[in-house]
Amino acid sequence: DAKTTQPTSMDCAEGRAANLPCNHSTISGNEYVYWYRQIHSQGPQYIIHGLKNNETNEMASLIITEDRKSSTLILPHATLRDTAVYYCIVKMNGGFKTIFGAGTRLFVKA
Amino acid sequence: GAVVSQHPSWVICKSGTSVKIECRSLDFQATTMFWYRQFPKQSLMLMATSNEGSKATYEQGVEKDKFLINHASLTLSTLTVTSAHPEDSSFYICSAPLGAGSDEQFFGPGTRLTVL
């Protein structure tokens, strides 16, 4: 599975959009970009995933660059409850094994 | 949505004892489950893949005789930490994909093990 690079931590003001970047320059053509988050002392939670088109669901939007070497997770209106570690993972669809990197620690501040 | 539960949510044990952690898929069947370990302020580390009806597959560096995995049914996998020591104290998390080839993987709430 391709490796990802994410900033160690980010701050965001409550109510503003949180934009979390991820670099995955070695992604292969059949690998998807997945995002999970982990709130303190809980199990990870699936957020969204995509192959090459932008995706949106009730939690977030995923913007993938045309060359697929990077992506951005967007939380449109961050709340204090969005404070968590966000993991960007690249893996093949249906290839269940999920390898976690260091992730980005997002702090949403009032 | 699909739910994965773990039991117990936390456990404290004495050094040298064995501890069993259960992972259940509550409303779906899982032929495969995954076990992770997470130390404070670190990311999740995949320990092993639990396969229903066959032996687990362990990641490099994980002792299979230390961490016994049994996946006896389509809804239950157990991880037994044998002869636990303080360095085994960690947050253990399991996960299960919704179905064969499914994109969706659901994680349990985790079990915090403290070995005294």
Image (cartoon, grey):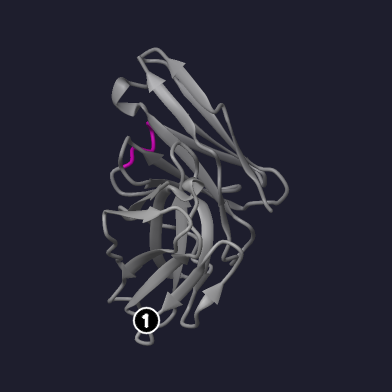
Residue A102 at x, y percent in the picture? 30, 52
Picture quarter containing residue A3? Answer: bottom left
Secondary structure, magenta segment, majority class: loop
Residue A98 at x, y percent in the picture? 43, 57
Q: Residue at x 45, y 28 (%)?
A: B112
Q: Is residue B65 magenta?
A: yes
Residue B64 at x, y percent in the picture? 38, 38
Residues A70 and A20: in front is A20
- Above or below, B86 against A51 in this view is above
- Above or below, A12 against A72 in this view is above
Q: Write the start and end of the magenta stretch as one range.
A: B62-66
Residues B72 and A64: in front is A64
Is residue B103 among the parts visible in the rendering? Answer: yes
Q: Which residue is mark 1?
A: A68
Residue B16 at x, y percent in the picture? 36, 15
Label 1's element?
A: loop
Instruction: Please report, as a chain letter, where disc 1 is located.
Output: A
Q: Is disc 1 surrounded by few (<14), some (14 to 19) or many (20+) residues within 10 Å?
A: many
Q: Residue at x 49, y 38 (%)?
A: B69
